Image: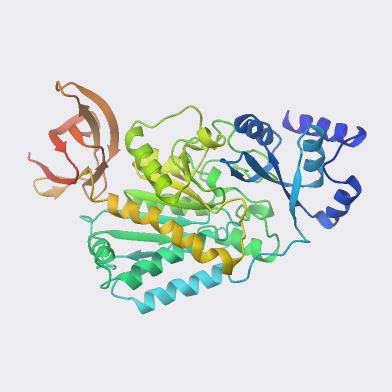
Amino acid sequence: MQSIQRFILMALAIITSLSFAHDSTAINKMFDKNWQILASFKTKEFHQDFKELTHLNIDIAGVDVKNNYIDVLLTSEDYQVLANLGYELEITQTKGISRGPDEEYKNPEEIALLMQEFADRFPEITHRVSIGKSLEGRDIWAIKISDNPETTEASEPSVLFNSMHHAREIMTPEVGLDIIETLLNGYNSDAKITKWINQYEIWVIPMFNVDGNNKMWNHDRWWRKNNRGGYGVDLNRNYPTGWNKCNGSSGWRSSQTYRGEKPASEPETQAMMNFIETVRPVFNISYHSYSELVLYPYGCSPERTATKDVVETIGKEMGRLLDYAPGTPWELLYNADGGDIDWMYEQYQVIPYVIEVNSRKQGFQPDYAQWRDKTVQRNRAGWQYLLERLEQTGIRGQLTQNQKALSDFTINVYKLDGNGKRSFYSQYVGQKTGYFHLVVQPGTYELEFNSGDTILAKSRHTVADKLAQIAIDISN
């Protein structure tokens, strides 16, 4: 039906006398050699316009939620369709005419060299690993920053910061690199950073979509997806949770939100999923651009989280610190299914966020000298807040049996009111090391440890303003 409607609208646009915001002859010239344009329009109703744009498979570049603007990347056909529907479009960039990406931004090879350089300069607190190979065989590099980097210290909570699910968002690796540089340079000179590195396992993946970024540099400056078959899959619509659930992705290979043939079809997606299962971070930030937003699960309307008080409270505080708008994707923008943060949250109860850096004034590829340092410095408040939040309200501990870690268990978490009446709060999948880390608000909680249908143990805890450390051992 989408293809039929699109064809009808295109035909109407061609045969009907149109009132373009720009001269149609000039527009046709702009689209010679398959050029595209970046255009914007002022919206009166975000959700309605997003619904229509998504239905037409229009590439939505970014938004300005404060001033009600939407940016779109258009072919000549897209432009004609939207103009015929009454959209008053203002052209801001033209691919093939406008300046390409600033070469001071990093490509995959440069990221790989920088990761090796960090490991060589700071061997006592870094461990560089490949979390897997991309479709075209490139390593996806991660770096662990901790006081015993070669050792997995299960007693220490971990946190993950990753960048560039989408290839054209070239500012996002700079945020990841700045996290690494700030932590490494601050060790043993900044008391707070030293404490974080000594007490936590901090992981950073500065460039996730390495194949797509390579294509962006060499073939298409606005390329978004990986490079599956030359048409690409949107990695952030390819995760199993909510895959193809709410019209928040596309089944068209040509669409910028093409979700792939099946959930987790892409090796990059599989690499991230395996990594999360192994590392089990308490928090995650996935950096994207642009729109100055802090997004949290879930992507499909009208779902809300069981631990909404925690996820939303932390998200709103990051929004306040960054002066970014916080909310779920469907509340602020549009439905988005198959995203990484939904999968992380549902599968392993990671508290995850997408941060969309930069405004529409800067776009995907702002001038490096003018905007790089401003962007990374502004975003330090967000990731540093999560590191501080690790030691605040929550419950962390280990489940053992005769002093040996149990690896197969879940925890049903109940919150108790002032009268001792309990209500279901959340469920947590235990780590293979027996450890668990529950991020909760102050209050009294009952934990029910289960293996299948068997209740292994129960415990009750009152959480104040600091992380409660507990140990639960069951004997035969």
Q: Quadrant of residue 167?
A: bottom right
- In the picture, measured across the screen, residue 319 lies left or right of residue 459, that is right
Image color mode: rainbow
- Position of the C terminus, as image quadrant, is top left
- In the picture, measured across the screen, residue 81 lies left or right of residue 313, that is right
- In the picture, measured across the screen, residue 32 lies left or right of residue 313, that is right
Q: Residue 130 location, x and y as percent?
A: 43, 64
- Position of the N terminus, as image quadrant, is top right
Q: Residue 132 location, x and y as percent?
A: 46, 60
* 45 over 36 or under it: above or below: above
Q: Residue 195 location, x and y as percent?
A: 23, 63
- Is residue 475 or residue 17 the one in the foreground? 17
Q: Quadrant of residue 227?
A: bottom right
- Is residue 409 or residue 337 the one in the foreground? 337
- Is residue 95 or residue 148 the one in the foreground? 95
Kindly give the residue lying farthest to the bottom in the view shown: 121
Q: Does the image show residue 245?
A: yes
Q: What residue appears at the point 55 percent right and 34 percent down from the top-left corner?
A: 335
- Is residue 428 or residue 29 the one in the foreground? 29
Q: Does the image show residue 206?
A: no
The mark total stands at 0
* 470 over 369 or under it: above or below: above
Kindly give the residue lying farthest to the front in the view shown: 67
Q: What residue appears at the point 47 percent right and 49 percent down from the top-left corner?
A: 355
Q: Residue 293 location, x and y as percent?
A: 50, 45
